[in-house]
Image (tube, rainbow, N blue to C red):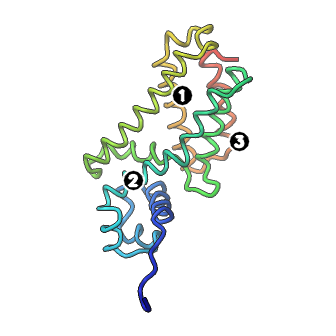
C-alpha cells in the first residue's frame, strides 16, 4: 500500500538497543538515545518491546546469546590442556571487552554495577542477578566436573575458583571501559592462572 512505513527489523533494533545499554547503562540510556539508535519512534518501541525495563531485559538476553555464550566453549575444547582451555576462555572474554565493533566492557558487569543504586527496576535487577548466578554455576560445574581440575583439587574449591574468575573478569571489564589497552589486560591473565595453581 502506497505510503505505508516499511516494517523495521526487530533483531537489528534490539541489537542497537543492546549497544546503547552496554555503553551507557540502564540509567544513562534515555528513551531518545534508544529510539535514535534503533531507528524507531516511541510508540513503535512500546508496541514491539514493551517499556524500557522490558527492552533492557531483552537486550541482556541478546548480549548473553551473541557475545557471552560461546566463550564458555573454550573450557571444554578437545585436545587442549587445562591451562590452554582456561586461558582461551579468559582471552576471549577480555578481547570481547575491548570494544572492537562493540562498546567497551561487559553488558552484564555494567548492569550489575547499577544494582547497588536505586535506578534499576526490580525485574531488571532480578534478570541481571539470575544471569550472573547462571554464569557462576556454569563455572562451578566446570571446575567440579573437569578431570584435570579434579587432579589439581580445584573441584573441592569450585565455588571459590569460579568466583575468582568472575571477579577477575569484572575487573578487566571495568579497566577496559577506563581505557586500558589489550596488552595490559591480557598480560595479567598469566598471573590469574598461577593464582588458580594452573601452569
Q: Nearer the viewer, mark 2 or mark 3?
A: 2
Which secondary structure, mark 2?
A: helix
Q: Nearer the viewer, mark 1 or mark 2?
A: 2
Q: Residue at x 62, y 49 (%)?
A: 98
Which secondary structure, mark 1?
A: helix
Residue 148 locus on image (x, y percent): 64, 13
Residue 15 locus on image (x, y percent): 49, 60
Q: Nearer the viewer, residue 33 or 8?
A: 8
Q: Residue at x 69, y 34 (%)?
A: 187
Disc nearer the start of the sequence (1/2): 2
Label 1: few (<14), some or many (≥20) within 10 Å?
some
Image quadrant assignment for residue 190:
top right
Which residue has dot 2 on it?
Answer: 58
Q: Nearer the viewer, residue 108 or 28?
A: 108
Q: CA distance from mark 1 to mark 3?
A: 19 Å
Answer above or below: position of 144 versus 118: above
Which residue has dot 1 on it?
Answer: 165
Which secondary structure, mark 3?
A: helix
Q: Nearer the viewer, mark 1 or mark 3?
A: 1
Label 3: few (<14), some or many (≥20) within 10 Å?
few
Answer above or below: position of 29 versus 32: above
Q: CA distance from mark 2 to mark 3?
A: 33 Å
**Any mark on residue 183, and which?**
3
Q: Nearer the viewer, residue 176 or 16?
A: 16
Quadrant of the frame with the N terminus: bottom left
Answer above or below: position of 156 versus 6: above
Amino acid at each position: 500500500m502506497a505510503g505505508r512505513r516499511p516494517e523495521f527489523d526487530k533483531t537489528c533494533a534490539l541489537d542497537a538497543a543492546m549497544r546503547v545499554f552496554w555503553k551507557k547503562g540502564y540509567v544513562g540510556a534515555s528513551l531518545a538515545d534508544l529510539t535514535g539508535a534503533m531507528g524507531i519512534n516511541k510508540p513503535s518501541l512500546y508496541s514491539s518491546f514493551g517499556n524500557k525495563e522490558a527492552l533492557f531485559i531483552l537486550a541482556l538476553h541478546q548480549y548473553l546469546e551473541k557475545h557471552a555464550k560461546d566463550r564458555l566453549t573454550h573450557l571444554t575444547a578437545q585436545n587442549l590442556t587445562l591451562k590452554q582451555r582456561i586461558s582461551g576462555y579468559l582471552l576471549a572474554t577480555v578481547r570481547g571487552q575491548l570494544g572492537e565493533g562493540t562498546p567497551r566492557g561487559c553488558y552484564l558487569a555494567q548492569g550489575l554495577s547499577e544494582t547497588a543504586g536505586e535506578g534499576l527496576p526490580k525485574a531488571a535487577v532480578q534478570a541481571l542477578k539470575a544471569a550472573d548466578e547462571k554464569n557462576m554455576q556454569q563455572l562451578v560445574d566446570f571446575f567440579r566436573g573437569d578431570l584435570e581440575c579434579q587432579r589439581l583439587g580445584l573441584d573441592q574449591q569450585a565455588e571459590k575458583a569460579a568466583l575468582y574468575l568472575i571477579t577477575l573478569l569484572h575487573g578487566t571489564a571495568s579497566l577496559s571501559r577506563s581505557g586500558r589497552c589489550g596488552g595490559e589486560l591480557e598480560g595479567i591473565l598469566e598471573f590469574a592462572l598461577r593464582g588458580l595453581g594452573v601452569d
